[in-house]
Amino acid sequence: MKLKNPFQSVKKQMCASLPKAILLWGMAFVVVLNVSAVQIIRTDFNREIVYFEDYRANEKWVNVSATSSNADIKAAVSWGKFGTIDVAGTALPSEALVLSIESPEKAKDWSAAITSGLLAAKNTEANLGKLTFSFDNWVSSVRPVLVRIESFDANKVRTGGLEKFVYPATANFFLRSAFELSDMKTFGDGKFNPQDPFVNFSFSIGDAGESKSELRVDNVMYNSPAYYVSPTGKDSNDGRTEKTAFANPQIALDKAKPGDVILMMNGKYTGTKGSGSVASFKHSGFPSAWITLKNYPGHTPTILAHGKTGVNIALGNDSTAKESPLLCYLEVRGLHIRGNADEAGKLFPTELGKSTNNTEVNGISVSGDNGPTRMYHHIRLADNVVEYCGGFGIFTRTVDYLTVENTIMRNNCWTTSDLVSAGLGVMMYADFDKADNVTKILIRNNQAYGNICKARTSKFNGDGLLFDANCEDYIYPDFYLGRTLIQNNLVYGNGGGGIQNWGSHRLDITNNTIYHNGIDIKWGNIGLDFCKDVRLINNIVVALPDCPLDRWFLHQADRKVENVTRINNLYYGGAMPNIPGTGDIVADPMFVNPSLDPSVADFRLKPGSPAINSGVQNFTDMSSVDLDGKTRPEKGMNRGSY
């Protein structure tokens, strides 16, 4: 069916009525038994009980269809084994929907969509900020995905619609997206009514210059909150409403089931007495039903990581590893986690330089070390601020399918005595599945600054971002199979290195801005040591006069660094020349206001900057948006994160 193209302008609207369906025969989509009232619509598109019994036979998208904006565009939707890998130790995809598109060379500015058809939606929640939509999406080449939800009344008449673009980080990668309906914009006539009895979902992509394109969709969830938490609440409450909120997030996490969203309201949280963390996950989600701990809409709750971990995703110990649960499909979103490293020197002067709970607390800690298979998987940390934690801002270890995005990690590591410390540390990777040489770890759109080891010991570091030990010589039982994409990050003013990589491989470091790191110890702004199979593309690297640009350490040769591709990076300053690559330049990037003071720093580019429109784009790992969320041009993208 021919539709208007929403990708020409967000303001242009699709047809108000549902298109005629191109039905799929024999479709049977399945999800989980024992659905709670908060799960409005949910499906993983599987017909088999394959993992965690993620199965529900009575929810079917029987009217799913494919639509296109141009008559000469061939668009078809099919069901099959195109989805996420849900079974550990295999490379077998689960079942999902795939939109297949064929376009002639002359066809331009087209769009095509998967449309669900009308789905029954029993919902009483009217606050759009408390309604969450989440899903996995995959594209054959990087381009925006337009997501729409429309409401229909009892007579199946459309009453309104909402839309939002999501931006894949790379091709051939399932991106987990989650947002509230309040983050979407109105489109078309009428007003979206979340209490209407029917909804219609659609997922669209536009022209990207290919004759054949694909969009895949899996693990869809539309839900409302399960529990509320407020410092003025009571742990004896049921937690089901704002007025009957729990006082501590731990009570909600102890009760959480797959698909539950826990909302934390304004205030400060210190955790229960004697606990090792303020909030610790105890249970796992399912592929289509993640457990989420997040902020109440419009609120900024603060977790005080004082003498204890802020958010903990790590259970068990050496003796209980076989009995400990395997934690997976978990999300932490929209939280402020604050330690007291700025006060620890006065409060605990005798403990500085020692490893204690008062000096080395992590803001968020994720570790599968003591899990039953020494591995956790599918963890998403997004839209958080983590600051003033004495140890790591965010520490992760033995985790697969990790995403950290849109998060600020600042002023951490101040009181640690550990050599290994950073705003974010991704260490000792572990494989959930057998997917080989594809992106599985995504670190994008983050800021890391002011992470400095101020406790002077014989060992100190304080990197912005640290990627450590995933090669065959450094992890058990073997090397990590996946790739790590480090994209669109701003890293500046850290005590150690900017983006430091040790004993790692299969790293794709693209479109980052790295400025004046190595304040305390002369690590490189981008450092590689014992690394191989690394791609450095479109980065801006500016070093202090006494620090390396792209070497591991000042006056020390990189050790066992192999198969490094360097393309279209910009370098400036530094104590040593950069290692030259294809299209690299040495020039002042002309930032608007480069500074180590975050209150005035502005690393956007001035007009005339040599980094403008000089980046390379013919790689799959190039983002379609920058750190500000602005769309990058189809031709001539900038170097750096803006």
Image: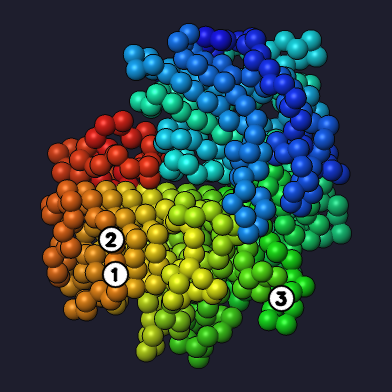
Q: Which mark is residue 561?
A: 1
Secondary structure found at label 1: loop
Q: Amino acid at mark 2?
A: Val
Given residues 369 and 525, the one toward you in this image is: 369
Label 2 vs label 3, nearer the camera: 2
Q: Residues within 10 Å of mark 3 (few under 14, many from 20)?
A: some
Residue at 63% in and 19% down: 65
Compare marks 3 and 1 and give the one earlier in the sequence.
3
Residue that badge 3 annotates = 321
Secondary structure found at label 3: loop
Compare marks 2 and 3 and give the one earlier in the sequence.
3
Q: Residues within 10 Å of mark 2 (few under 14, many from 20)?
A: some
Q: Which mark is residue 564?
A: 2
Query: Left or right of 304: which side holds 41?
Result: right
Given residues 584 and 603, the one toward you in this image is: 584
Residue at 46% in and 76% down: 474
Given residues 112 and 571, the one toward you in this image is: 112
Quick check: marks 2 and 1 in contact, CB under 8 Å? yes
Colouring used for the render: rainbow
Query: Left or right of 92: which side holds 386?
Result: left
Q: Quadrant of residue 376?
A: bottom right
Q: In which quadrant will I find the N terminus?
A: top right
Q: Quote the CA–CA distance across marks 2 and 1.
A: 7 Å
Q: Residues within 10 Å of mark 1 (few under 14, many from 20)?
A: some
